[in-house]
Image: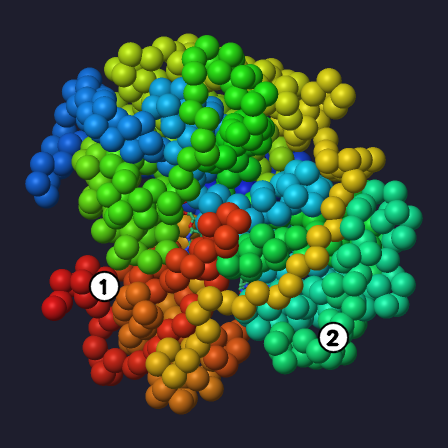
C-alpha cells in the first residue's frame, strides 16, 4: 500500500530545558501534529548538536500528557470548568483576600521556563494589578547570589563572556558546576576544547566527568570554596602574579583584599578544604600565569548560606588577575533554566523592576508608575521562600504560581506542602499535573514553548525569538494571555496587549539593556546578546571591556563561612544534591519520555564504597535516608565519584524527593537555602524490601 505523503513544515525555535539555549527545529505535519525534532545545523551555540533532553522534547509536550482545560478542586477531586468561570472565581477570591488582609497577602511566582513576555506580564500583574512586589521565581534558589554578588563587585550579575570563548582561552576553570550533565552541549564543547589543548581545572567535591579528564581536579570539602579561593589569592599576590595595571586602572579595594588574605596560606587551609597546599599553589599559578582564563561556575558556588560571599570570592580572583573584559576570560555563571536570565532581567524578583532597577529607588518608582500609568507598591516584596514562611505564620493567603513545582523543588518538602495546603487561594498554571498542582484550588492549562510566540534569554545573555509551531492542546492559553484575562476580570487594562510583540516592545522601552531589540532584529540572526542599545546596536558579546557599570570594580574581602548543619553522631554523613543528565528539574517534562525514563531508576543515593561497606549496603540495596526534617527511601549506587563521608542525590524524583531532607538555612543576603549540604543518616533496609515512595511513607503512622 502506498503511503499518503503529508507535507511537513519546519519551525525554528529554542530548546525549552537548560540555559545553553540550543537551536531546534520542530517538524510539523499538514494536520498540525509534531512529527520530529532536530538540531539546527547553523546555530551559533549548539552547532548542529542537541543533548538527549533536547531530542526528547516532543514527549514532554504531547497533548495526551497535558492539562487541556481549567480545573477546579472540590474536596479531593478536580472538575473541569470554563475559563470564564475559573477567572471570575479566582478574581473574586483575590479581591476578598486583599480587602481583608491588604495587597501584600497575595503574590505571584513566575517561571524561568516561560518566555520573557510571560515573565514581564507576571511582574506587571503583581505590581500594577495586585499592587504588591511579592513576585519571585526559581532564581531565588539558583543564581540569586550571582545577581547580588556580581552586582556589588562588577555592577551586573550575568555571564561576562560568551560560550564560544571556551575555544579562545588558554585555561578553563570549572568550579561547582557539572556541565556534561547539566549544560550538556556546552559540556561536550569543553571536552572538544580540552582535546584542542585548552587546559582544564575542575574544583568539585565529586569526581565529575570533566574532573576525570581535567589537568587538575581539586576535590575540596563541600562548602570550603572561600578558604580555597582566598588561599589561591594569597599565592597570586605573594608571587606577584596579579595584573597590577588592571587593578590600578579598573578596581578599588585592593589593599584591603590583600591584607585580608595575608595569613590565608595554602598550608593553613589544607584541613578545612581537604586539598593539599601543593595543589592549591599549582592551580593559583596556572590561573595567575594564564594570558586568558575563564571561570565557569554553578550551584556548587551559589547553593550555600555563603552563596553571595562565594560569588564575591570568585569575582575577586578574576579581577586581581585582570581576567575580565577580553575574549576567553571572565566570570561566567552557567545560568540554569532556558529563560532564567530573562526572568531576572524582566524583574521577576521582589526588589527590582525590569532591568534591575531597584523598587526602592525614587527615579525608578516614578519611571514605572508613569510608564504603566498607575501607582505601584513601593516596598520590596517577599521572596518565594518568604511567602511559604509567611503563609505558615498566617500573614500571607493567596498565591498564583506558573511553571514551577515547589513541592518537589523547594527545600524541606513537609514545610512547603503544609504552606501550600494552608494557602486559601492556590492557582497553578501548568503543562501537566505536578505535585504542587495537586494541592491547587484551580489548575490553569498553559501553552508550552512550542505553542506560543516570544523570546528566551540564554546563559550568555542571548535573546532568541521562538515561533509557535503547534496549537495549544484543548483550550490551553499562553501565560501572559491568561494573566491578561485575569487582570481584565479584576478591572485592569494594564496587560491588555494585542500580541507578544507588543509585550516585548513595552518591556524593551523600559529595560535599558533590551532597548535596541525588536522582533524583526532578533529574527534576522540567532538573537542578540544584551546590552543592545544605541551604543551597541548589534548587542554585546563581552561585558566590561573598557569600564564597569559601577565605574571601577570592587574588590571585597570575604571570609570562610561554615555550612549550617555539619555532620554529627546522629547524622554522620553530608548530603549534597545535584542533577542527572537524563532528567530535568521536578521531572514533570523529562519523565514523560520512556527513553529518558529507562536510563535511571526513580531515585538514587550515590555513596562511597567505604561508607557502603561500613553500613553493609550493597549495589542497588534499598536504603532509608533521614535528616532532621524528613525521611525517604531509595536505592544505593556505590561509586568512588563521591568521597567518603559525602552522599549525593538528584532532586528530580517525586517518589524519593531529596527535598524531604534538605535544609532551609539561608544566605542572609539573598535568602538562598543551603541545598548543597545537610547532615543525614543512611540505613540499609531489609534485603528484598522495595523502597516505599514518599506518599506511602507519609501515610504510615
Ligand atoms: N540534566 C539537567 N540539566 C540541567 C538541570 C536539570 O535539572 N537536569 N537544571 C538546570 C538548572 S535549573 C541549573 S541551575 C543548572 C545547574 O547546573 P550545575 O550548577 O552544574 O548544578 P548541580 O549539579 O546542582 O551542581 C554542580 C556541582 O556542584 C558541586 N558542588 C557541591 N558542593 C560544592 C562545593 O562546596 N564547592 C564546589 N566547588 N562544588 C560543589 C556538585 O558536586 C556538582 O557537581 O543545570 C541546568 N541543567
Ligand atoms: N535539592 C535541590 N533542590 C533544588 C536544586 C538543587 O540543586 N537541589 N536546584 C534548584 C534550582 S537551581 C532550580 S532552578 C529549581 C527549579 O525548580 P522548578 O522551577 O520548580 O523546576 P522545573 O522542573 O523547571 O519546573 C518547571 C515546571 O514548569 C512547567 N512549564 C514548562 N514550561 C512552561 C510554560 O511555558 N508555562 C507554564 N505555565 N509552565 C511551564 C513544567 O511543566 C514544570 O512542571 O529547583 C531547585 N531545587
Ligand atoms: S544542552 Fe540544554 S538547551 Fe541544549 S539540548 Fe540539552 S537541554 Fe536543550
Ligand atoms: Mo536553576
Image quadrant in which you'd find residue 34: top left
Which residue is pictured at 16% across the width and 20% down the height? 85
* Element type at mark 1: loop
Percent of width and height locating residue 533: 69, 20
Which residue is pictured at 18% across the width and 31% down the height? 71
* Element type at mark 2: loop
Which residue is pictured at 54% across the width and 68% down the height? 562
In the image, residue 494 sits, relative to residue 16, either above or below, namely above
Q: Nearer the viewer, residue 251 or 156?
A: 251
Q: Is mark 1 within 8 Å of ligand 2?
A: no
Callout 1 environment at 10 Å: few (<14), some (14 to 19), or many (20+)? some
Q: Nearer the viewer, mark 2 or mark 1?
A: 2
**Residue 441 as seen in the image, left or right of residue 453:** left
Judging from the image, the colouring scheme is rainbow
Task: Give the CA separation, mark 2 to mark 1.
Answer: 45 Å
Q: Quadrant of the N terminus?
A: top left
**Residue 421 as seen in the image, left or right of residue 621:** left
Q: Nearer the viewer, residue 34 or 659?
A: 659
Name the residue carrying label 1. 693
Circle number at residue 514: none
Name the residue carrying label 2. 266
Q: Is mark 2 within 8 Å of ligand 1?
A: no
Amino acid at each position: 500500500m502506498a503511503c499518503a505523503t503529508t507535507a511537513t513544515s519546519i519551525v525554528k525555535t529554542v530548546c525549552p530545558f537548560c540555559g545553553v539555549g540550543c537551536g531546534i527545529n520542530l517538524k510539523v505535519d499538514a494536520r498540525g501534529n509534531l512529527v520530529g525534532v532536530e538540531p539546527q545545523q547553523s546555530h551559533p551555540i549548539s552547532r548542529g548538536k542537541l543533548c538527549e533532553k533536547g531530542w526528547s522534547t516532543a514527549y514532554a509536550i504531547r497533548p495526551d500528557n497535558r492539562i487541556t482545560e481549567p480545573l477546579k478542586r472540590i474536596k479531593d477531586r478536580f472538575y473541569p470548568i470554563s475559563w470564564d468561570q475559573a477567572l471570575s472565581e479566582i478574581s473574586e477570591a483575590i479581591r476578598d483576600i486583599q480587602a481583608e488582609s491588604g495587597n501584600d497577602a497575595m503574590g505571584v511566582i513566575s517561571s524561568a521556563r516561560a518566555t520573557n513576555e510571560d515573565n514581564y506580564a507576571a511582574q506587571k500583574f503583581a505590581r500594577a494589578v495586585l499592587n504588591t512586589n511579592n513576585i519571585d521565581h526559581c532564581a531565588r534558589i539558583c543564581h540569586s547570589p550571582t545577581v547580588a554578588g556580581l552586582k556589588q563587585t562588577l555592577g551586573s550579575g550575568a555571564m561576562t563572556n560568551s560560550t564560544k570563548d571556551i575555544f579562545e582561552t588558554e585555561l578553563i576553570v570549572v568550579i561547582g558546576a557539572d556541565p556534561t550533565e547539566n549544560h550538556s552541549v556546552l559540556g561536550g564543547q569543553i571536552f572538544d576544547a580540552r582535546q584542542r589543548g585548552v587546559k582544564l581545572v575542575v574544583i568539585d567535591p565529586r569526581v565529575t566527568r570533566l574532573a576525570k579528564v581535567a589537568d587538575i581536579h581539586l576535590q575540596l570539602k563541600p562548602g570550603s570554596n572561600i578558604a580555597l579561593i582566598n588561599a589561591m589569592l594569597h599565592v597570586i599576590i605573594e608571587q606577584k602574579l596579579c595584573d597590577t595595571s588592571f587593578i590600578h586602572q579598573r578596581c578599588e579595594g585592593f589593599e584591603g583584599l590583600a591584607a585580608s588574605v595575608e595569613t590565608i596560606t595554602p598550608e593553613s587551609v589544607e584541613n578545612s578544604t581537604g586539598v593539599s597546599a601543593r595543589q592549591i599553589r599549582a592551580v593559583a599559578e596556572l590561573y595567575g600565569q594564564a594570558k586568558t582564563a575563564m571561570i565557569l561556575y554553578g550551584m556548587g558556588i551559589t547553593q550555600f548560606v555563603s552563596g553571595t560571599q562565594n560569588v564575591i570570592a570568585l569575582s575577586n580572583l578574576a579581577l586581581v588577575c585582570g581576567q575580565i573584559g577580553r575574549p576567553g576570560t571572565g566570570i561566567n555563571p552557567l545560568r540554569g533554566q532556558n529563560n532564567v536570565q530573562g526572568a531576572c532581567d524582566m524583574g521577576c524578583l521582589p526588589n527590582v523592576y525590569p532591568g534591575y532597577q531597584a523598587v526602592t529607588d525614587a527615579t525608578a518608582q516614578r519611571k514605572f508608575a508613569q510608564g504603566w500609568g498607575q501607582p505601584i507598591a513601593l516596598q520590596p516584596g517577599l521572596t518565594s521562600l518568604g511567602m511559604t514562611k509567611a503563609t505558615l505564620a498566617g500573614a500571607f493567603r493567596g498565591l498564583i504560581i506558573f511553571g514551577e513545582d515547589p513541592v518537589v523543588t523547594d527545600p524541606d518538602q513537609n514545610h512547603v506542602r503544609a504552606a501550600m495546603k494552608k494557602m486559601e487561594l492556590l492557582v497553578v498554571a501548568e503543562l501537566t499535573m505536578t505535585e504542587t498542582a495537586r494541592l491547587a484550588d484551580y489548575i490553569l492549562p498553559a501553552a508550552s514553548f512550542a505553542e506560543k510566540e516570544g523570546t528566551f534569554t540564554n546563559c550568555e545573555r542571548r535573546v532568541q525569538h521562538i515561533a509557535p509551531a503547534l496549537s495549544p492542546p484543548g483550550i490551553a492559553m499562553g501565560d501572559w494571555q491568561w494573566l491578561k484575562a485575569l487582570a481584565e476580570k479584576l478591572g485592569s487594562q494594564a496587560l491588555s496587549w494585542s500580541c507578544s510583540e507588543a509585550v516585548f516592545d513595552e518591556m524593551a522601552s523600559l529595560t535599558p539593556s533590551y532597548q535596541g531589540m525588536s522582533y524583526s532584529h532578533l529574527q534576522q540572526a540567532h538573537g542578540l546578546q544584551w546590552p543592545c542599545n544605541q551604543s551597541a546596536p548589534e548587542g554585546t558579546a563581552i561585558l566590561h571591556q573598557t569600564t564597569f557599570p559601577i565605574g571601577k570594580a570592587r574588590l571585597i574581602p570575604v571570609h570562610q563561612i561554615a555550612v549550617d548543619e555539619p555532620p554529627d553522631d546522629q547524622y554522620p554523613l553530608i548530603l549534597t544534591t545535584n542533577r542527572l543528565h537524563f532528567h530535568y528539574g521536578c521531572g514533570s517534562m523529562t519523565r514523560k519520555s520512556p527513553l529518558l525514563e529507562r536510563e535511571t531508576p526513580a531515585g538514587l543515593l550515590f555513596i562511597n564504597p567505604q561508607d557502603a561497606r561500613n553500613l553493609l549496603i550493597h549495589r542497588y540495596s534499598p536504603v532509608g535516608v533521614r535528616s532532621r526534617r524528613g525521611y525517604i527511601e531509595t536505592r544505593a549506587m556505590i561509586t568512588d565519584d563521591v568521597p567518603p563521608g559525602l552522599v549525593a542525590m538528584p532532586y528530580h524524583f517525586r517518589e524519593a524527593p531529596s527535598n524531604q531532607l534538605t535544609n532551609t538555612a539561608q544566605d542572609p543576603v539573598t535568602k538562598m537555602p543551603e541545598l548543597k549540604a545537610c547532615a543525614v543518616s543512611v540505613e540499609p533496609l531489609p534485603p528484598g524490601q522495595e523502597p516505599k515512595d514518599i506518599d506511602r511513607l507519609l501515610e504510615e503512622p
